[in-house]
Image (cartoon, rainbow, N blue to C red):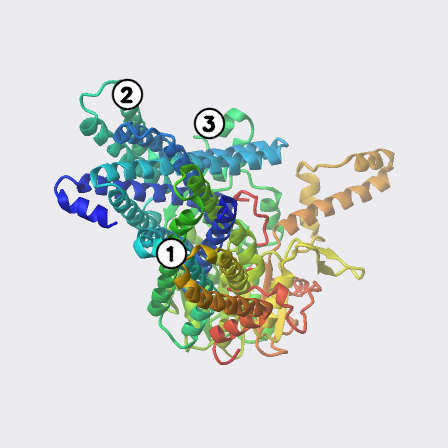
Amino acid sequence: MAAEMSHAADTPRERRVSGTLVLVTAVLAACSVVYELLAAQTLAALAANTVIWYSVVIGAFLGAMGLGAFRCMEIPQDRDAWRELLGVELRLTLAGAAVVPAIHFGHMLHAYLEVHGWPRVAAVVFFGGAFAITTVVGYLTGIELPLLMRIGAQQGGGTRGGNIVLGVDYVGSLVGALVFPLVILPHTDLLTAATATAGVNLVVALGILVHRTAGRGRLLGPALAAGTLAGLLAAVAASTARIEQYFLRKYYYYTHANASLLAVFAPMPELPEVFRVRSPYQRIDIMQDVDPDASRTLMQFYSTKPDDPEHPRDEILFLNGDFQTNSTYEEIYHEYFAHVPIVATGRVPRHVLLLGGGDGYLARELLKHEGIEDILHVDIDPVLPALAQTHPLLSTVNKGSFRDPRVTHLQGDGFQFVRTTEQRFDAVYIDFPVAVDYDLSRLYSREFFHFVRRCLAPGAFAVFDSTGTSFLTAPDAAGVQVPVEGNDWRIYSNTLVAAGYRDIVPYLTTLEVDNAAAAEWLANAGVNIPVDADFMSDWQAADEEQRKVLRDLLIRRVLTENMIALQQGFVMMAADEGTFGTAWKDPGVPLHLLTKERFEHAFDVHFEVPPVADADFVNSILRPRFPTLPVWRPRRPF
Amino acid sequence: MHTATVAGVAFVLAFCSIVYELLLGQTLAAFLGNTVLRLSVTVGLYLLSMGIGAFLARGRVLARPVLALQSVELALSVTGAAAVPLLFLLDSWGAPHAALSATGHGLIVLIGVLTGLELPLLLELGGGAVDVRRNFVLGVDYVGALIGTLVFAFWFYPRAGLVTTAFVVASLNAFAGVLLASQIGRSPAEDRSRHGLVLVAQLLVLCATVVCLARADAIAEACIRLYLGGDA
């Protein structure tokens, strides 16, 4: 060390790391971290659980950097390090630009392979492909750094120069790690970011090409490569909006893209455009359901809403690629959500807290009650509530609910709001997306529900949609629906008990299957009903009378399947026992669908509430119990 | 020290450090929200502070690799075990978000710097001048970090939870620190008493983390009650 210092002091001019090298190192380090996070974010967007995929991608990237560092040791010391760097940068430009599209292509191929009977191959292609491209970028980054350190050592007197480069590299990495979540994610799409970052790598390569290798032979290859890459990047940059639309269509209309291997990649101009708005917190998409199933038509036998010609149909709202609400039958969800607890408590709340629900649909239902004096709407995302007031679909369906003078908007994290507020409410409506990652799991945690309970005035209630409690039920010996393996009820119930609730009532939006009009339509509409071989042999052996019975059974089965597909679970809860009754009392507001019979039917489930919380099933911020979805599943819109 | 032993220690230490960092990032996310931002900043700060640590590993520190490494492990196991409960304590005392954030990120940097110090010391112990051995240790270090991120995301956080994980990893870290005592013979005689002190402290920390691990559920419950405030 002392020797190095004196050495550096002897020749202060010549033995300094150049400003160019410092700048190049910082910029390249930032670029590499941005690629790493782009890969993580793209994978997380297409495979749900953010924390898991971030961790895996970061780990794979670090491991690959180690490999790259090994590789660099094999490059002879007498080679021109700048020249070596040129080759690395050209490769990194290509690999970096490919990060986002490669993961999207993997996702597209996954759907095709899965549908055609190769689910395992599909998983390997998608996840393996994502890790492969991450590894390539990490590997090239791993070669880059020792090369820069070598140049630093040549310029700055041995180890010291190398260490300065290393230090600058770390600072550059930090800059990249901050720019990504603070600038790139809220302000641009991932493809544009990847292309721009690749452009930076290419500029560095061009700089080396022009300044550092002048007069040394064999530059034709790198020059041609650089030119090609420049053209490629320019072409992508000029059409990022179109490419984004291409990937959006592939994501939402994946059932159309599965027809053949050609269709997987072919553009689908015949399909409607997907509307997308980005906010700092989420990607808001609205798409057209181009091949709605039978339940769309069946709705007219259950709801009076389809009679309304103004009512938009088949438009679906997605947040971060996850299904939120379909305009065709959103009233099932929102009428049960808003009115069942009000009917069950027998009184209309005066002061309401609405957490989430940025589409304004639930607010529309609540505003039907004139007894509700004010609604405080807390949403972390300012963009969706604003869009709810301007977008033709959202503002039509929510009937301008967010412009109502009774609604006040507060932008902020609902969790922090309930934790810190001194206000008390007569009702808390919690309308958050499904807990598909650890971040959202907080909003269904014991801690969150505890703070919600603290916000409740005496006699007040809270209610939320408990995805994962519907579908997974089966009739018990008495014919009442009970949860089966995989049902999330055990997590919800234990979490709510731990959070101190004494009255916990689950309910399901189960529509009746003995609907004569719906059955008749199914029998006559020529809907394609798949039947198995057993049914066919029974049918052939049956006489006229028996066939009628068989046909009725079949129609009932199909109706059941359609109604289960529309089923949603909710949980309403209160601090005191006896808050909720199950007797119907006309809420006195116009309803499309909710009736006395359906209200009573909603409680036809037997979901046990444990007397004491079992810690193993309590969802906590210290130990998330959600998501319960399998990890190795790509995200799909439906 | 055999290269294999050093590589084993390097693996364990890299594993522990990345898990500490992820624990802190996730705890901050629990308090402040926005996991993506927390994870990105955690990784960026971790890399930066590892660089600072590597830069500090020279001169007198590098001259006494065993003592330095023992001290680093002592500091890491204490910091790693205490970090998560400390944040909950701070929060329950009414610390504003800015103070929580500063403490959390300060701890991330501290753990990063200590981790950055580790690697050159290990290389000094195990590899010496031979490049191939040094590379082997370096590679194992990366693999440790890779495995750490995977185990954290798939198992530690969703199954064990933040508090249990902190004590599991700190115990592992403290155990590795105790094992380093086998290397004391390499140090000059005048350093022996210091070695003894650090070793005793490390043994005490190991006992403490193991006891905490046995009581992890109760400590986690205490953390949650602190967080929930008076009326839990």
Task: Give the left or right position of residue A240, taking residue A426 as reference.
Answer: left
The outermost residue toward the front is B189
Q: Which mark is residue A266?
A: 3
Which residue is identified by label 2? Answer: A224
Amino acid under disc 1: Arg
Q: Chain of mark 3?
A: A
Judge depth for marks 2 and 3 and give the one in front.
2
For the question of whether residue A287 can be seen, the reply is: no
**What is the crowding at mark 2: few (fewer than 14 residues within 10 Å), some, or many (at least 20)?**
few
**Type of amino acid at the residue the image marks with label 3:** Ala
The answer to whether A555 is drawn above or below residue B206 in the figure is: above
Alpha carbon separation for disc pair 1 and 3: 64 Å
Q: Are marks 2 and 3 on the same chain?
A: yes
Element type at marker 2?
helix
Q: Residues within 10 Å of mark 3 (few under 14, many from 20)?
A: few
Q: Residue at x 53, y 49 (%)?
A: A328
Q: Nearer the viewer, mark 1 or mark 2?
A: 1
Query: Between residues B103 and A42, which one lies in front from this camera angle?
Result: B103
Q: Are marks 1 and 3 on the same chain?
A: no
User: Which of the labelled discs sits on residue B64, or is there none?
Assistant: 1
Pointers 2 and 3 in contact (C-beta within 8 Å): no
Chain of the residue under the numbered disc 1 shown in the image: B
- 1 vs 3, front mark: 1
Residue A509 percent across, percent down from the top left:
62, 58
Query: Within the image, what quadrant is residue B194 found in?
Result: bottom left
Type of amino acid under label 2: Leu
